[in-house]
Image (spheres, rainbow, N blue to C red):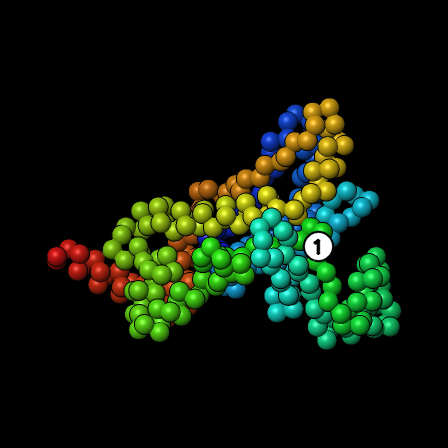
C-alpha cells in the first residue's frame, strides 16, 4: 500500500489553474491551497483509503483569512460514521476524544493552555467531558466501495487476506497487488504502462474526491467576492512532476524496495517466468 502511495505522489506538486486572468484570485487560491496543507495530506488519505477502506479528514477555517489553514486526518479508531439509508444525505461523523485528548483539554499547564488558545471553547469542553465532537463543516468522508451497497468501505487488503486463505503463492500476491506484470516484461514497459498507470489512476481518484467535495465551499464563496464581475469560477488542480527526467527511475526504486521489504525475490520470479515464456 505504501508503494502505491509513494508511486502516486512521487516527485509531484499541486498547481492551481483555470481561474481566468485575475492575478488577485489566483494568488488567493494558491495561498489558500498552500496554507491548508492539503498537498501534504492527500498521500496519507490515499493510504487510509487502501488500508482501511475509507478516510475521514476535516479542515480548520480561518474567518479572518477566508480560507482553511490546516487539514487534519482523523484517526479512524476514534471516529464514528453513520451513513443514511437514502442517497443525497451527508453521513453523521463524530470524533470521540481519547484519554490523551481529555487530559490535554483539561490540563492547567501554561504551555498547554497556550496551545488551546484560539480553539472553539465548545470543542474543548466536549473533549474534557469525553463527549463526541460533531465533524460537519469542511469534513470529507470517502469509502472504498467494493460493491454498490458498501457504504462504509472495504480494505484493499481484504483481497490479500482472501488470497492467503486460498493458499496463494508470492506470484499470485504480486498480481493482486497490481505488480504481477513485473513478471516477464521489460522494465520500461512495465513502469510506463502498468505501475505508473495504476498510480496515476489512484492519484486522480483521491484528488477528485477531495477537490470536488465540500472541503472547499467557503473558498468558492470568498472567490465570488473577489471576482464578482465574472461570477463564480471553480479552480482546477493538476499534479505536476518536479523532475520528469528522474521520475521513472525513482518509481522503479520505490517498487523494488517495496518488494524487497516483503521478502519476495523479484529477480528470481522474473528470471523463472521469462524462462518459462521463452520455452513454451
Residue 104 in view in this figure = no
Q: Residue at x 69, y 38 (%)?
A: 220
Q: Is residue 253 left or right of residue 185?
A: right
Q: Quadrant of residue 156?
A: bottom left
Residue 228 in view in this figure = yes
Q: Residue furthest left?
A: 279
Quarter containing the C terminus: bottom left
Residue 235's place in the image compared with 196, above or below, is above
Instruction: State the image coordinates of residue 223 (x, y, percent, origin top left).
Output: 72, 34
Q: Is residue 271 left or right of residue 124?
A: left
Instruction: State the image coordinates of residue 3 (x, y, percent, origin top left).
Output: 45, 59
Q: Residue furthest front?
A: 86
Q: Secondary structure at mark 1?
A: loop
Q: Residue at x 40, y 70 (%)?
A: 161
Q: Residue at x 58, y 53 (%)?
A: 86
Label 1 belongs to which residue?
136
Q: Nearer the viewer, residue 226 or 33?
A: 226
Instruction: State the image coordinates of residue 194 (x, y, percent, origin top left).
Output: 35, 49
Amino acid at each position: 500500500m505504501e508503494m502505491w502511495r509513494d508511486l502516486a505522489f512521487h516527485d509531484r506538486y499541486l498547481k492551481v489553474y483555470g481561474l481566468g486572468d485575475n492575478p488577485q484570485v489566483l494568488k488567493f487560491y494558491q495561498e489558500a491551497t498552500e496554507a491548508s496543507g492539503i498537498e501534504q495530506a492527500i498521500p496519507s488519505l490515499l493510504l487510509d483509503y487502501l488500508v482501511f477502506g475509507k478516510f475521514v479528514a476535516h479542515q480548520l477555517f480561518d474567518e479572518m483569512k477566508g480560507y482553511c489553514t490546516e487539514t487534519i486526518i482523523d484517526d479512524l479508531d476514534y471516529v464514528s460514521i453513520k451513513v443514511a439509508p437514502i442517497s443525497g444525505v451527508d453521513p453523521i461523523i463524530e470524533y470521540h476524544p481519547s484519554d490523551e485528548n481529555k487530559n490535554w483539554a483539561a490540563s492547567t499547564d501554561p504551555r498547554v493552555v497556550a496551545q488551546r488558545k484560539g480553539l472553539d471553547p465548545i470543542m474543548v469542553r466536549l473533549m474534557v467531558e469525553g463527549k463526541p465532537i460533531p465533524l460537519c463543516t469542511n469534513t470529507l468522508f470517502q469509502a472504498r466501495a467494493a460493491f454498490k451497497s458498501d457504504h462504509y468501505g472495504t480494505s484493499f487488503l481484504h483481497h490479500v487476506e482472501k488470497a492467503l486463505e486460498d493458499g496463494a503463492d508470492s506470484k499470485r500476491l504480486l498480481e493482486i497487488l497490481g505488480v504481477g506484470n513485473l513478471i516477464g516484461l521489460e522494465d520500461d514497459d512495465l513502469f510506463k504502462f502498468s505501475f505508473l498507470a495504476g498510480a496515476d489512476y489512484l492519484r486522480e481518484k483521491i484528488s477528485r474526491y477531495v477537490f470536488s467535495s465540500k472541503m472547499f465551499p467557503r473558498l468558492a464563496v470568498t472567490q465570488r467576492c473577489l471576482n464578482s464581475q465574472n461570477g463564480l469560477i471553480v479552480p482546477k488542480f493538476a499534479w505536476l512532476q518536479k523532475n520528469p527526467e528522474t521520475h521513472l527511475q525513482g518509481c522503479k526504486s520505490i517498487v523494488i524496495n517495496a518488494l524487497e521489504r516483503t521478502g519476495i525475490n523479484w529477480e528470481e520470479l522474473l528470471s523463472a517466468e521469462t524462462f518459462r515464456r521463452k520455452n513454451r
